[in-house]
Image (cartoon, helix red, strand yellow):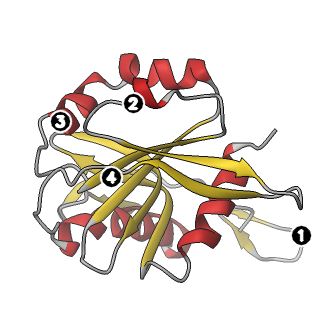
Amino acid sequence: MAKEFDMLRIMWRHFTKKSKYMFTNIFFFYEGISVEADFMIIDDDGYCNEYEIKCDKKDFVEEFKSKPDKHNLLRDHHYSCPNRYYFAALPGIIDKETVPEYAGFVEFEPTTGGDYRMRTIKKAPLLHKIILDPKNLFQKIYYTYFNCKQTLYSNDRKRIRRADGSKAEKQPTTKSTVTKKGRRSKGLFGR
């Protein structure tokens, strides 16, 4: 039985030559909410396509109960949503008839070599033609990257940056300790 990681690997191979930008497990902003996208691509037309991976039927049903705001925005074709939205699963997990009208559906079918290939069962409709501003789209990526690097490289008390670039409140750093070899260790990531 394939797991989410296996499906991400299949999608990565499938889109490597077809898409300029691919992201896995990235936080993506819908209007007023932050949601993690399992797999996201930016196609040659600049459209954003999100793929939500479902590993079992319960996970598919829970998606709508646990994220009603996200699905309301998708249903309303809101400009802050991706241009196309897909569900992705192994055969037998999602019935084509249960996929909402605003979403597409891809399956990972087994091949004779024991691997899987991706097959489109239902093409996702274009929810809107607005090309998302890369500055806004990639702001969350930079926010996470910046704060990680700030934590690694800062000697003083660090300031966390918000996604909009403004400074948040000061965060206490871990106490430095001196190791037996006389090196300073901040205790973060073993460094």
Which of 164 and 166 lies nearest the eye of the viewer? 164
Q: Earlier in the sequence, mark 2 or mark 1?
A: 2
Residue, x 41% and y 67% (percent of image)? 41
Gap between marks 1 and 4, in whole Å? 44 Å
Name which of mark 3 and mark 4 comes first in the sequence. 4
Q: Which residue is mark 4?
A: 28
Seen from the viewer's position, the closer of residues 58 and 161 is: 58
Tell me the element at label 3. helix
Gap between marks 3 and 4, in whole Å? Answer: 13 Å
- Coordinates of residue 135 in the picture (x, y in percent): 19, 73
> Residue at the location (15% across, 69% down)?
131
Residue 44, percent across and down?
31, 81
Q: On residue 64, which mark appears? A: none
Residue 5 visible to the viewer: no
At x 35% / y 70%, what residue is drawn? 142
Q: How many marks?
A: 4
Label 4 Cα crowd, 10 Å radius (few <14 / some 14-19 / many 20+): many
Circle 1 residue: 180
List the residue tagged with mark 3: 73
Q: Tell me which numbered mark, 2 or 3, is placed earlier along the sequence.
A: 3
**Real-space Cα distance between discs 2 and 3?**
16 Å
Closer-to-camera residue (68/149): 68
Other-residue count near label 2 (Cα within 10 Å), few / some / many at <14 / 14–19 / ≥20: some
What is the three-letter code of the residue carrying label 2?
Val
Q: Which label belongs to residue 99?
A: 2
Secondary structure of the residue carrying tag 4 is strand
Earlier in the chain: of badge 4 and badge 2, it is: 4
Closer to viewer: mark 1 or mark 3: 3
